[in-house]
Image: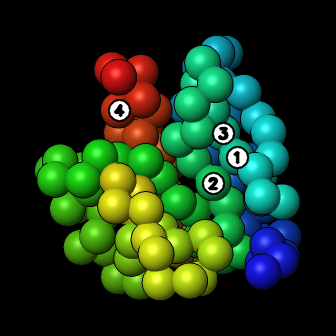
Amino acid sequence: MAAPVPSQQALEVFDRVAAELGDTAIERGRMMGRPILKLSGTMFACLNGELIGLKLGAGTPEHSGALALPGAELFDPGGAKRPFKDWVSIPVDLADDCVTFAGFALAHVAAH
C-alpha cells in the first residue's frame, strides 16, 4: 500500500509540531514514504495522510488521553488492521492537541 498523500494543511501541522517541540536533537526523516520525527534514531511521530501517529506507550495516561480525542485511533499506517499498540493517530485538524501529545511522545522516547 502506498503512503497516503498528506494535504498542505497536514504538512504545515507536522512542521509546526517539529518547530514547537524546539529540541535540536530531533531529526526529520522518512519511513515507508511518510515524513517522520525521531530522537536518537527512534521514531516518535509519523505523518500518515491527515493523521499524525505518536508513540505514547500503551497503558500510559497520555496514550489514553490521546485516544479520547475526537477522531483519534490506534496508529495503523498500513491500514491492514494491525495497529501499533504503543501509538495513537490524531487528526491534523486538532493541531494544538497534535503539538501537546507530540511533546509527550518525545518525552516517552527520551525516557526509554
Mark carried by residue 36: 1
Instruction: Determine whether the residue tagged by mark 4 lies in a helix, strand or loop.
Output: helix
Coordinates of residue 95 in the picture (x, y in percent): 54, 62
Coordinates of residue 77 in the picture (x, y in percent): 61, 70
Q: Is residue 29 left or right of residue 51?
A: right
The answer to the question of whether label 1 and label 2 lie on touching residues, with beta carbons closer than 8 A, is: yes
Q: Can you identify the residue that label 3 sits on?
A: 37
In which quadrant will I find the C terminus?
Answer: top left
Q: Is residue 62 left or right of residue 36?
A: left
Q: Amino acid at mark 3?
A: Leu
Q: Amino acid at mark 1?
A: Ile
How far apart marks 1 and 2 lie (CA) works out to 4 Å
Q: Can you identify the residue that label 4 sits on?
A: 108
Mark carried by residue 12: none
The answer to the question of whether label 4 and label 1 lie on touching residues, with beta carbons closer than 8 A, is: no
Mark carried by residue 46: 2
Q: Amino acid at mark 4?
A: His
For label 4, count other residues whose C-alpha is less than 10 Å away and answer few (under 14), some (14-19) or many (20+). some
